[in-house]
Image (cartoon, rainbow, N blue to C red):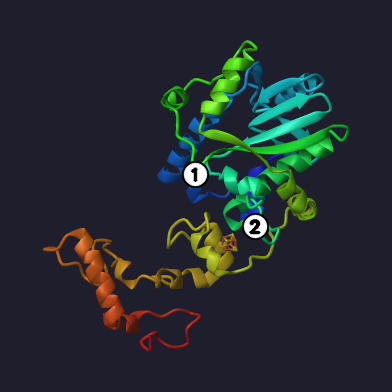
Amino acid sequence: MQKYLSKNDFSRWMKCPTAAYYGWSGLESKNESDAFLRYLAEEGQTVGRMARRLFANAEFIEEKVLEAAYRTTRARIQNDCTLFEACVIQGDFVVRPDILIRKDSSIYIIEVKSKVGNLRQHREGKMPINMYGDVRAAYKEIVHDLAFQVEVLRLAFPDLTVVPYFLLPEGSALSNKEEVVTARREEQIVLSGGDSVSVNRRRSDSVLKFFPTEQAIQHIKASTVATMDAMAVTWKSGERPAPQLKYGCRNCEFRLKEQESGDGFHRCWGRLAEPTPHIFDLHQLYSLKLPDKKQALLRCDESLSRNDNWKRGRLLENEGSHRHFAPQLRHPRHRESVDHL
Ligand code: SF4
């Protein structure tokens, strides 16, 4: 069992408390082996390196052991400083902000994301908040992620003012070739020297821009605190939160394979997870595979290209040709076969 709750746990908890439980219990997640998610993570690291070029006189907190990293962070934060990958432990929680700056009586936390921002909308007060004053759905995940970190910092440094920012690619800004090429190199980028002129030039040339986020964080402060408390109580109890079966379970990261009875999805759904094809797979009948995994239920015509076969499948499905197959498909939640579809 892990020693602290991190922003990953919080992010999972926001989607599904049972998934958070599986995460901190060490259950296998398909996200760990997903090549596309790994690629996105590598791209995220490139954006992180681009961000680090915009700060001078910063220090990397290198320690991997959390307690050691926290001791170094605490020591540095006594004075003005800029830290990359700082570590703050507070009670049950741990955070490692991308960029942390101590300046006078304030701590600036800067979260670097590859999600595109819009400075014009931000100045008009529409990003990441919508016209009703709520956090926009598109930014919800990253705002909650930052809100969790801000709350931990507020608890850890009650005498300092915590000021949150996003550093995001601005949608209308042109990217700078030198910036991208340098950031794609593997090594960590830490600028030395206090050349504020070159840092300012890099910032104005960069595709990354600063987005103050205090208003959005303040807006969800109360719910963030309540959610963190509820998560910590469950974590300490060691009990699994009762699964809330829902349509969103189809994309659960703990749904490994159709027949993987030990995965999180089967633990939640029990016998309802067993039918093959599963009810979650019935929305695109033309894409269903026979057991040999080679043929779609609506058979492919090998004389056609893949694209044309796809169009043909859509056509057949729209015409109702899938009814030839539907009588075979039964599900425990359906008393009758689905031939009335
Ligand atoms: S199957 Fe559903 S309830 Fe269970 S962990 Fe996944 S999302 Fe949560």
Disc 2 to disc 1, how far (Cα)? 33 Å
Q: Is residue 182 left or right of residue 100?
A: left
Q: Is residue 38 above or below residue 194?
A: below
Q: Kindly tell me whether residue 9 is visible in this rendering.
A: no
Q: How crowded is the residue under tag 2: few (<14 C-alpha within 10 Å), some, or many (20+)?
A: some
Q: Is residue 63 left or right of residue 161?
A: left
Q: Position of residue 23 (x, y in %)?
A: 61, 49
Q: Is residue 141 left or right of residue 42?
A: right
Q: Kindly tell me whether residue 158 is visible in this rendering.
A: yes
Which residue of the protein is positioned furthest toward the right in this rendering?
A: 159
Residue type for callout 2: Asn
Q: Is residue 135 left or right of residue 171?
A: right
Q: Secondary structure at mark 2?
A: loop
Q: Nearer the viewer, residue 223 or 258?
A: 223
Q: Position of residue 97 (x, y in %)?
A: 67, 33
Q: Is residue 128 above or below residue 77?
A: below
* Residue occupied by mark 1: 32
* Residue occupied by mark 2: 130
Q: Position of residue 307 (x, y in %)?
A: 22, 60
Corner quadrant of residue 257: bottom left
Q: Nearer the viewer, residue 97 or 7?
A: 97
Q: Secondary structure at mark 1?
A: helix
Among numbered discs 2 and 1, the one appearing first in the sequence: 1
Corner quadrant of residue 245: bottom right
Ligand 1 positioned in quadrant: bottom right
Q: How crowded is the residue under tag 1: few (<14 C-alpha within 10 Å), some, or many (20+)?
A: few
Q: Is residue 136 above or below residue 107?
A: below
Numbered disc in front, either 2 or 1 = 2
Residue drawn at x 49%, y 64% as measured from the top left:
250
